[in-house]
Image: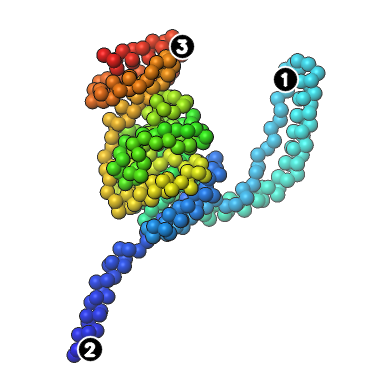
């Protein structure tokens, strides 16, 4: 009897221990790094860094959907444009040299075309096999999808695209880094989910940018001070809806060049269906992926998206409205050779003046279109409204 009681106790203890083991099991992440547009060199750095974050934290394991290697180049050489009339003999000689070079490149292209077409067919087959993982059934095994520097229409139209949205809506997590917003520009559902699509990057990878942290208490940004600087390529967006997301980081236009008269959000979070999305524009440069603070930014953002840490996802369009107005004033002041600091201080004091912010935001769009005297006149109007 004693033996039976001992055995029963052991079984009960084991049974109670099972949920704890399951709860501690690493989450499963699917990292997508395929590109149908520009391919960032930092992809090769991002892939192992994400795996390292998962391993060192014990939070998740990683599977990949990777770009097949050795993509064939089927770009046909471009014939040089012949001037309507040569200015001199030197220009004519330069054109003939360019034409000879073109003919040689074209001959080589034509000779290698059958081989390159066969290679392209094989590459396409490997690509299709890679993206075949993005099916509703296969995605069920994952807790989180990470689009790391993806670009372009990475998967064809149809079911697999919708499966991504359904994955997040069902309660799962989505992470996007850098050019995840330069992905699926032809898929309105994805653009609406991630809340923006690439519209240029006036701030290149070598630009020392200054950033404002709007929510230093949020898990995804608690590692950054209220203001900080970093070199990275920063996007501006079309189809960005300030009322759909909680903006965590923005470009500080007063302390960054070139200046633009509009807000440039850099990182945000949102709830989508019953799932969560975390996006950061940082990640163009290798140095960013290797940076310990950025890695904390990613890890904490992932933990938040997995609902392991709490932080607000309540949209903050009032923050965007103020940042938009501040960017306008900073840009206009620089052009007018005025000190922006006192103007921005007065604007901050009027942050609850919804009518003023609305007018400044509307005027900022007009200011961006204008030149010369009309632009200066509109700026003067903005300064007067802020100083009133």
Q: Which mark is residue 83?
A: 1
Q: Earlier in the sequence, mark 3 or mark 1?
A: 1
Q: CA distance from mark 3 to mark 1?
A: 35 Å
Look at the numbered disc 2 and give the secondary structure of its residue.
helix
Q: Which mark is residue 3?
A: 2
Q: Position of residue 158 (x, y in %)?
A: 44, 46
Look at the numbered disc 1 and give the secondary structure of its residue.
loop
Quarter of the rendering containing residue 99: top right
Q: Earlier in the sequence, mark 3 or mark 2?
A: 2
Which one is in front, 11 or 248? 248
Look at the numbered disc 3 and give the secondary structure of its residue.
helix
Residue at the extreme bottom: 1
Disc 3 crowd rating (10 Å Cα; few below 14, some 14-19, many 20+) is few
Quarter of the rendering containing residue 240: top left
Q: Which residue is rendered at x = 27% and y = 67% of the image? A: 19
Q: CA distance from mark 3 to mark 2?
A: 94 Å
Check disc 3 and report the residue beneath it: 372
Q: Is residue 105 visible?
A: yes
Is 30 rendered above or below residue 188?
Answer: below
Q: Which residue is rendered at x = 52% and y = 47% of the image? A: 43
Quadrant where the C terminus sits is top left
């Amino acid at each position: 009897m004693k033996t039976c009681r001992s055995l029963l106790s052991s079984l009960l203890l084991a049974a109670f221990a099972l949920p704890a083991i399951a709860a501690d099991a690493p989450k499963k992440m699917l990292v997508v790094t395929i590109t149908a547009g520009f391919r960032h060199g930092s992809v090769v750095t991002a892939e192992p860094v994400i795996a390292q974050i998962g391993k060192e934290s014990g939070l998740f394991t990683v599977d990949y959907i990777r770009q097949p290697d050795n993509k064939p180049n089927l770009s046909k050489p471009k014939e040089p444009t012949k001037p309507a009339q040569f200015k001199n003999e030197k220009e004519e000689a330069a054109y003939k040299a360019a034409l000879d070079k073109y003919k040689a490149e074209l001959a080589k292209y034509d000779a290698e075309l059958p081989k390159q077409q066969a290679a392209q067919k094989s590459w396409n087959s490997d690509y299709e096999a890679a993206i075949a993982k993005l099916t509703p059934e296969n995605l069920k095994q994952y807790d989180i999808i990470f689009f790391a520097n993806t670009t372009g229409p990475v998967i064809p139209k149809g079911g697999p695209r919708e499966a991504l949205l359904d994955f997040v809506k069902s309660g799962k997590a989505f992470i996007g880094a850098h050019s995840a917003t330069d992905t699926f520009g032809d898929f309105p559902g994805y653009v609406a989910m991630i809340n923006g699509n690439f519209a240029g990057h006036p701030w290149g990878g070598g630009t020392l940018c200054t950033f404002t942290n709007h929510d230093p208490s949020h898990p995804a940004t608690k590692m950054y001070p209220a203001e900080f600087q970093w070199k990275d390529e920063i996007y501006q967006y079309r189809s960005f809806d300030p009322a759909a997301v909680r903006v965590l980081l923005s470009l500080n236009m007063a302390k960054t060049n070139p200046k633009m008269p509009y807000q440039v959000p850099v990182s945000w979070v949102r709830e989508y269906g019953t799932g969560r999305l975390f996006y950061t524009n940082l990640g163009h440069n290798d140095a960013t992926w290797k940076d310990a603070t950025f890695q904390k930014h990613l890890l904490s953002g992932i933990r938040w998206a997995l609902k392991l840490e709490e932080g607000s996802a309540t949209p903050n369009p009032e923050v965007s409205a103020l940042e938009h107005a501040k960017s306008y004033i900073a840009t206009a002041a620089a052009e007018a050779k005025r000190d922006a600091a006192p103007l921005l201080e007065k604007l901050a004091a009027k942050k609850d003046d919804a009518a003023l912010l609305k007018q400044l935001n509307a005027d900022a769009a007009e200011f961006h279109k204008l030149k010369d005297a009309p632009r200066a006149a509109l700026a003067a109007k903005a300064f007067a409204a802020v100083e009133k």
